[in-house]
Structure formats: structure tokens, C-alpha cells
Amino acid sequence: MTTAAVTRLALGVRIYAWLRGRRSTWRERTTARDRGEVELSQRRVYILPTRAGLGFGALLLALLVGSINYSLGLGFGLTFVAAACGLVDMIYTYRNLAHLHLRPGRSSAVFAGEEAPFELQLSNRTRLARYALWIDLDTMKDPRHAVDVAAGASTSVVLSSTSKQRGWMKAPRVRLSTRFPLGLFNAWSYWQPDSRALVYPFPEQDAPPLPSSGHPSPDGFGSAGSDDFAGVRSYQPGDPLRQLAWRHIARLDPALGGQLVTKQFEGGSLDELVLDLDALPPRLDLELKLSRLARWVLEAELRALPYALHLGRQRLGAALGPAHQAACLEALALYGLPDAMR
């Protein structure tokens, strides 16, 4: 390859990279102000002919030239009728996407590395039904989801994106497109949903067992001293099943409003389970420590062991249940992150 050819190739690569950069910047500017519900106005819908549309245009040109050369009246009629059909298709393709209302839905928390789901809602407030709307992430070359929205109705679609790191994950940019009804034109638009999903640290696979040390428990529950039985009390949410006083429960008459009771033990010398970040080996990096604590939180919930979580100055008291688990995992997900990422 000659020097001139290498120079032209390098120039072409630079121009292509510059065009891609300009395209990315244009997309960001288009969706920079998307907050809450968004309407796809006329200025946000773009339309271009497809390959089939370009072939159809070439066919119309050939028909027109042939009709002029041979003075074919029927040829002129066929050409103009076909051209009118193409124009009607262009208008309907554009109208199939314009003036849709988009709003973000709910998003669920996931662990790092899992697919984060984002619910998106499409609302059609016009009297024109919308068909064959393709929607997917902007990064996908070929859209995977097609929906129809009846006149005056709404529908929802769930898109998923792979989470990479803990913290809040912003919903990726979405691309909507349609080729309805004849496929001669492609209309598309971009949308940046105002939504985010919380990403927890991924639990450590081969984590060591739960720590056996902790702090004195004021209510007498823990891992030691369970021989000093003191009596029973009313069941409270979060009490482990192994502490239920089944013999007392069996003697209570359900017809008289029988209730669950829990065994209570003497003294406060029992250790409550405390998951302390500072107690982990200092040789571990922060992310591995958080992953280990996430595994311990799940293990404690599975074994119905009330646990507390200490992250430096942030302390969550001993408890049990889905709400406590979610609060602990959220604290682990956001620990040490800048305020801008919280």
C-alpha cells in the first residue's frame, strides 16, 4: 500500500470517528431535558426512506422516464398513483410515532452483574391506533420488543440492561422506531427515561461463615445462654421460629383469640449478630468487604438470625425481615460513594 493510500485511509478513519462523535453528542442534546413524562413532538421524530423505499423511488423514476419516452397515458397514471401511495405511507409512518406520551415506570433493585429491569410506559392519547412500534436500548443494533398501542390506551414494556457496579444505575437511552404500514420509510426517536435502579454489591461466592462474636443483646436472644429460661412473651415480628414456645401455643384456644408466644431467657449476656465493616481483615479491599457483608446479610436472613450492620459511623440496629434486609443492602450499595452518585 502506497503512502498516499495510507494517508487517505487514515483521513477516512478520522472523519468517521468525528461523525460518530458528533452523532453521539447530538443524541445527548436531544434527550438532555427529558424529565418525567415526555411527548414525542414533531421536532423529535425523524424519518428517512428504507432500502425498500429507495428501490421504490428508483422504480417510480423508471416508470416516469418510460412514460415520457413512449407517451404512455396509463404509465403516467400508474406512476402518479404509486407516488401518491408512497406519500401516504410516509405520512402514516410519521403519525404512527408522533405525539406518543412516554413516562418511566418502576425499577427493581438487583445485584451487580445482573440484568437491571426498567419499566417504560407508552400512552396513546389520540384517536389513532399505533401499530408495530419497536422499542429497545439505543445500544442494540436490532430492536427486540414490538408493541401496539390502541387509541386512548396505554401499554408498558420492560427493558433490561446489565449492571456493572454498585450504586444507582441510570436508565439507558431508548430508541423507538416504526416502519408501519408499508415499510418504505423508517421513523424513529430517542428518549432518556428519568429512572434509575439500585445495584447492590454482588454477594461473595465462597464467603466464610457468619461471625460468632458480637455485642450483648438486651432482649436475651442470641447464640449462647439459651438454657436460662425465664418465661414467655407475645410474639414480635422478627423473632426466630426456633424461639417460639410451641407447647404454650398448643394450649391456647384459637376460639378465644389464641396468639403466638416466644420464649424469653435470662440475662443480657447473649451475643447479637453484628456485621461490622471495620472488623473485617484490613488486607481486603473495600469492594470485597462489601460483597462479604452482602453475603452475610442474605445468610442471616435465611437462617432467621436478627443482625445489626455497622458501616463506620452508619449503624443499623439488630432486626430481621425484608425491610431490614433492603435497608442493609442499600447501605452497602451506597457506602463510600460521592453524594452525586447517591
Image (cartoon, rainbow, N blue to C red):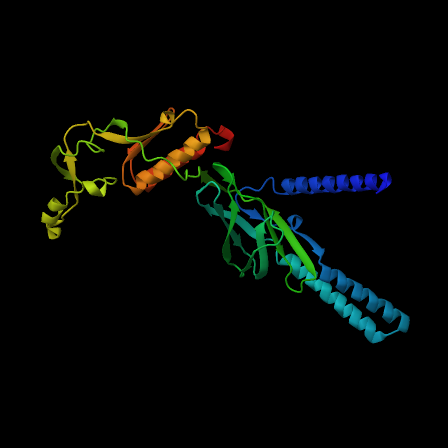
The residue nearer to you, when weighing 141 against 2, is: 2
Please name the residue shown 39% across and 38% down the image.
206
Q: Position of residue 73 (x, y in %)?
A: 84, 75
Quadrant of residue 238 within the rendered picture: top left
Q: Does residue 282 sit above or below 89 in this rendering?
A: above
Q: Position of residue 263 (x, y in %)?
A: 15, 38
Q: Position of residue 156 (x, y in %)?
A: 50, 54
The reply to whether residue 327 is in sight is: no
Query: Position of 150 compared to 183: left or right?
Result: left
The residue nearer to you, when weighing 240 against 175, is: 240
Q: Does residue 64 sit above or below 171 in this rendering?
A: below
The residue nearer to you, when weighing 305 against 198, is: 305
Please name the residue shown 15% across and 35% down the image.
264
Q: Position of residue 208 (x, y in %)?
A: 35, 35
Q: Residue furthest right?
A: 69
Q: Does residue 34 sit above or below 98 in this rendering?
A: above
